[in-house]
Amino acid sequence: MSAALGAALKKIAVALLSDPKTLKKVLSVVLTLLVAIIMPIAAVIAIFSTDFEIDVSEFQRLAIQNLTPEQQADLQFIEDTGNEIQAALTARGQEKRLKEALVLFLFALGDFAHEPGFVEKLAGCFVEGQTHAELIAAVNNAFGTDISLEDFEKIMSFVNRQIVDVARSQLGNVGGEPYWSWYGFPSRVEWCACFVSWCADQCGYIDSGIIPRFSGCEQGAGWFKARNLWQDGSATPASGAIIFFDWLDENGIQDGSPDHVGIVEKVENGRVYTIEGNSGDACQQNSYPIGYFEIYGYGTPKYEIGGTENDSESSSPVEGA
């Protein structure tokens, strides 16, 4: 299985194991695949807050050994189909949509997966620039299904929100010492970017190249812009986006450069809800109208497929607000 497919399925596995209601909807063989073969045991341990050591290779060997022949065949079919979906999307220039396709395959279209032409039919539902509503309409039309847009978006939000959960767990911290000291600073700096980087690191997003390690806002925004992972401040962001601000200075002027950064928690009723470090020297939740004039823009991490190795470290540390 390719690294990209494995990375996408890991995000789904984390979401599944974090939400009991969603967990009940999944066949045991799918969970066996995700946990035993794809998902690092360290992530399983972190989710269940268990403090013990496991031999990962032995764990995987025993898990596979205990599968019935029928389950092993199902497991192989899931892996093979996932690889075929990845190849079909890549051929169409839609490789960034792998996560959405896997969610549809695993959660909604299992009854169709053995039909001839399934992979091409699914891949054909993906076109550039479409919304989730347009995607679900295309899938329902192609397969004669009645997939709920609301249910699909709930699952996608579970998949994407790991960094939001980490950030939320830090609410109330004052002074930011865990974040700026983790970054390597010997004393307090303006630590909003260190906070975002720390949260990303807890999710493995820095090592996988999804979010950079940065301590300066201009540095971080530049990383996203250089990779075409950027939305301007008028956009409606997704949960997990990295939000940058350009504050008015003491003379009521914006200088066109980012001064502050946080994490988008959610968007509801025309407002962007955020979790920000160094907001009044604390980790706090804030909210702003969509398109608020001091929102500089959004970094849009590729949570679905990961980044590239050795691409996650920005240049030398730069202190940022």
Image (cartoon, grey):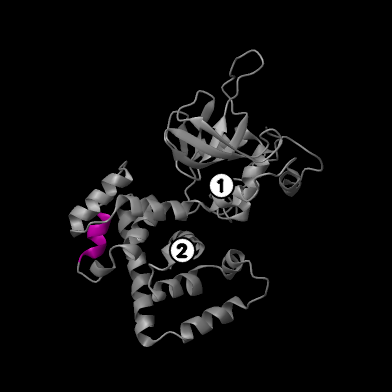
Q: Residue at x 59, y 45 (%)?
A: 212
Q: Is residue 179 left or right of residue 91?
A: right
Give the residue pinned by disc 1: 211
Residue 120 is a magenta residue: yes
Q: Residue at x 48, y 61 (%)?
A: 19
Q: Earlier in the sequence, mark 1 or mark 2?
A: 2
* Tag shown at residue 155: none
> Badge 2, how many Cα within 10 Å: few under 14, some, many 20+?
many
Identify the element where label 2 is drawn: helix
Which kind of residue does numbered mark 2 sit on?
Leu
On screen, residue 134 above or below 146: above
On screen, residue 114 above or below 189: below
Q: Position of residue 95 (x, y in %)?
A: 37, 53
Query: Which contiguous range is marked in magenta?
Result: 117-124
**Of circles 1 and 2, which is in front?**
2
Q: Is residue 273 left or right of residue 269?
A: right
Number of numbered discs on residues: 2
Q: Position of residue 151 (x, y in %)?
A: 35, 54
Q: Is residue 127 visible?
A: no
Quarter occupied by the C terminus:
top right
Give the residue pinned by disc 2: 16
Identify the element where label 1 is drawn: loop
- Asked which quadrant contains residue 123, the reply is bottom left
On screen, residue 32 above or below 84: below
